[in-house]
């Protein structure tokens, strides 16, 4: 994907679309939860892997926005949306990334949308409604927070670093993940 101005323009336009939809969906979920409260409406892989009405509504909103803007792209949504496309672009949507935190009123949740072109991720956006932070990334252009470039730490000494992780819902998956970081 690197090198072509047309490809760079495409990646940038996909990032802008993902950012707009993630922000709008995140604000709607945040405001809806504050106005109406919330309860889990279903579970997925385990009893603690929950789905809410807001997960479903957020995914429906995002999918509709993607289909309106780019009707020939493929889409895969965490809550079940699946559309084959013809452009080589496939959108990956997690309409509420961190549903458990969302359900319990904790700040650690967001809306995540990425675009892949022929199997390579070329753009992404993650909006965190509790802090009004928008993280975006475009292939070859780095990552940004609310429009400003961000970078990894240059620290190389392990005792001076911060390592954060999340673990899967299935016990057998957690065991493998815990062993990996032990």
Image (cartoon, rainbow, N blue to C red):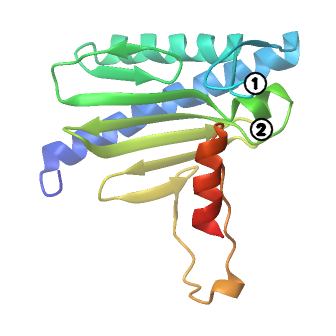
Q: Name the residue under label 2.
A: 130
Q: Which of 22 and 45 is in front in this view?
A: 45
Up-down relation of residue 159 to residue 80 (above or below):
below
Up-down relation of residue 123 to residue 60 (above or below):
below
Instruction: Report which quarter residue 39 is drawn in.
Output: top right
Mark 2 to mark 1 CA distance (whole Å): 8 Å
Left or right, 128 with respect to 19, comes to right
Left or right, 15 with respect to 122, comes to right
Instruction: Give the position of the C terminus as an image quadrant.
Output: bottom right
Question: Which residue reaches farthest bottom?
Answer: 157
Up-down relation of residue 95 to residue 3 (above or below):
above
Instruction: Report which quarter residue 142 is drawn in.
Output: bottom left
Q: Which of 72 and 75 is in front in this view?
A: 75
Could you say where residue 16 lies in the image, as x and y percent from the top left? 41, 36
Left or right, 45 with respect to 36, comes to left
What residue is at 17 percent from the left and 50 percent from the top?
Answer: 1
Could you say where residue 79 lies in the image, as x and y percent from the top left? 53, 18
Q: Residue 30 carries which label?
A: 1
Label 2 vs 1, first from the N-terminus: 1
Up-down relation of residue 86 to residue 136 (above or below):
above
Left or right, 124 with respect to 105, comes to left
Instruction: Report which quarter residue 76 is drawn in.
Output: top left
For the residue carrying disc 2, how many other residues have a C-alpha within 10 Å: few (<14), some (14-19), or many (20+)?
Answer: some
Could you say where residue 176 lies in the image, as x and y percent from the top left? 58, 55
What residue is at 60 percent from the left and 38 percent from the top?
Answer: 127
Q: Which of 178 and 6 is in front in this view?
A: 178
Question: Do tag 2 and tag 1 residues touch (Cβ < 8 Å)?
Answer: yes
What residue is at 22 percent from the left and 15 percent from the top?
Answer: 72
Asked which secondary structure carries label 1, the reply is helix
Asked which secondary structure carries label 2, the reply is loop
């Amino acid at each position: 994907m690197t090198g072509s101005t047309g490809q760079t323009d495409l990646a940038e336009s996909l990032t802008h679309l993902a950012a707009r939809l993630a922000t709008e969906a995140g604000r709607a979920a945040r405001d809806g939860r504050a106005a109406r409260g919330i309860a889990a409406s279903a579970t997925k892989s385990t009893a603690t892997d929950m789905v809410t009405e807001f997960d479903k509504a957020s995914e429906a909103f995002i999918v509709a926005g993607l289909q309106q803007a780019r009707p020939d792209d493929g889409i895969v949504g965490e809550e079940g949306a699946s559309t084959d496309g013809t452009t080589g672009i496939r959108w990956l949507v997690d309409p509420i990334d961190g549903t458990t935190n969302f359900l319990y009123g904790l700040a650690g949740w967001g809306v995540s949308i990425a675009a892949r072109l022929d199997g390579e991720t070329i753009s992404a956006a993650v909006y965190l409604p509790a802090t009004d932070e928008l993280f975006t990334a475009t292939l070859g252009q780095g990552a940004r927070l609310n429009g400003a470039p961000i970078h990894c730490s240059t620290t190389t000494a392990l005792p001076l670093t911060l390592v954060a992780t999340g673990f899967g819902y299935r016990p057998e998956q957690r065991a493998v993940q815990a062993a990996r970081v032990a």
